[in-house]
Image (cartoon, rainbow, N blue to C red):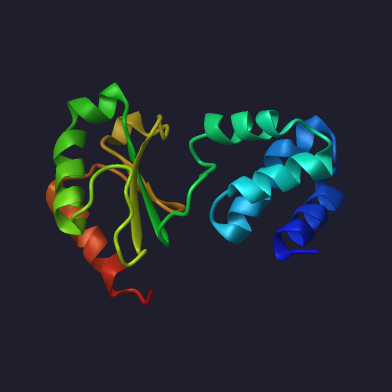
Amino acid sequence: MSPTQLLIRELADKYGRSREHLLPIMQGVVEQESFLSEYSMIEIAREMDLPAAEVYGTATFYSFLETKKMGKYIIRVCKTISCAMKGKGQVIMAIQDMLKIPLGETTPDGRFSLLQTNCLGLCHKAPAMMINHDVYTDLTPEKVREILSEYMKKPL
């Protein structure tokens, strides 16, 4: 049994194998493996006796369930109109300029991935972004450069 199969079996034992437990199982795989590979989605479907298309459809519906390998630090910039009106475009340009990657890509060293995401629920403090589970608000290009500089100092 592969480590992924073992992980999925443990998660299914913990949460249950009925359809309503699909999301926590998927989140558990992402937490341990950083993304849902095609292999892991097929194994989840097999373990839960669900169609693979249903597992894939669920994975691709939710923006926080990654289906491709991501960097150690996933930067998610809110793409709502509130953030756009308060300077999201300049924030994204500052990030892209500093990391030398476009939206949807990962740095060659595997440190950062840059994504846009739906509302983070922080419209009153726009523009906003998350780096993994850390939230940053009232962003400016200068503030973003300072934040990213601190992440660049962390060991890979």
Residue 11: % across, % down: 78, 52
Q: Quadrant of the N terminus?
A: bottom right
Q: Residue at x 28, y 42 (%)?
A: 103
Residue 45: % across, % down: 75, 39
Q: Residue at x 59, y 59 (%)?
A: 33
Out of 107 and 131, give the one closest to the viewer. Answer: 107
Residue 13: % across, % down: 86, 51
Residue 150: % across, % down: 27, 68
Residue 56 to residue 149: above or below: above
Residue 7 to residue 61: above or below: below
Q: Residue at x 25, y 60 (%)?
A: 148
Question: Going by the picture, which residue comes out furthest to the bottom?
Answer: 155
Q: Residue at x 80, y 42 (%)?
A: 46
Question: Going by the picture, which residue comes out furthest to the top?
Answer: 81
Out of 118 and 54, give the one closest to the viewer. Answer: 54
Q: Can you tell which quarter of the image residue 61 is in?
A: top right
Q: Can you tell which quarter of the image residue 2 is in?
A: bottom right
Q: Quadrant of the C terminus?
A: bottom left
Residue 154 to residue 68: above or below: below
